[in-house]
Image (spheres, rainbow, N blue to C red):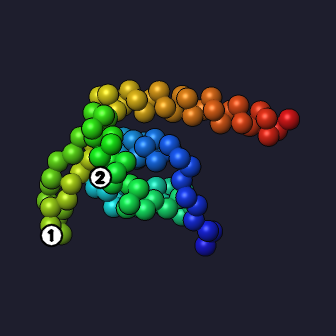
Amino acid sequence: MASKTDLLQGTLDRLSLKVVAQGPLHGYGIAQKILLTSKEMLQVQQGSLYPALHRLQRKGLLKSEWKESGNGPMAKLYSLTAAGRRQLQEEMAQWQRYTGAIALVLDS
């Protein structure tokens, strides 16, 4: 198995928005989706994830509601707001410009 890498500062919000855009998820599900999608390279610690989710909620980019999880206790599910969808589109475009510029330098 490849070694896990800490997320670059500022990317956790972007990754969380992207994962939640695919459908409502609880915090553990968000962390697992990031881990699995990254082929186990990006591991999100709870101590980083939940403050990020709360920050995104305070900004109006995520909303949450408690729902039964089907296998026991209630789970807090996060979903995107309309503002969150707009923010995600802007951040994805910005990320493409940023990584494109880095590629230009590295490939020169």
Task: Name above or below for residue 64 compared with residue 34.
Answer: above
Label 1: state its secondary structure.
Answer: loop
Quarter location, residue 82: top left
Horizontal and vertical percent position of residue 40: 54, 64
Q: Earlier in the sequence, mark 1 or mark 2?
A: 2
Location of mark 1 (residue): 72
Q: Is residue 80 visible?
A: no
User: For the N terminus, which image quadrant?
Assistant: bottom right
**Amino acid type shown at disc 1:** Gly
At label 2, counting other C-alpha atoms closer than 10 Å, the crowd grade (few under 14, some 14-19, many 20 or more) is: some
| Horizontal side, residue 93 vs residue 82: left or right | right
Q: Is residue 92 above or below residue 16?
A: above
Q: Position of residue 25 (x, y in %)?
A: 29, 52
Q: Which residue is mark 2?
A: 25
Q: Residue furthest right?
A: 108
Which residue: 39% across, 41% down?
A: 17
Query: Residue at 57% across / 34% down in the picture?
Result: 95
Q: Identify the residue at image location x=86%, y=35%.
A: 108
**Could one spot residue 74 in this view of the protein?**
yes
Q: Nearer the viewer, residue 2 or 102?
A: 102
Position of 72 with respect to 23 (left or right) is left
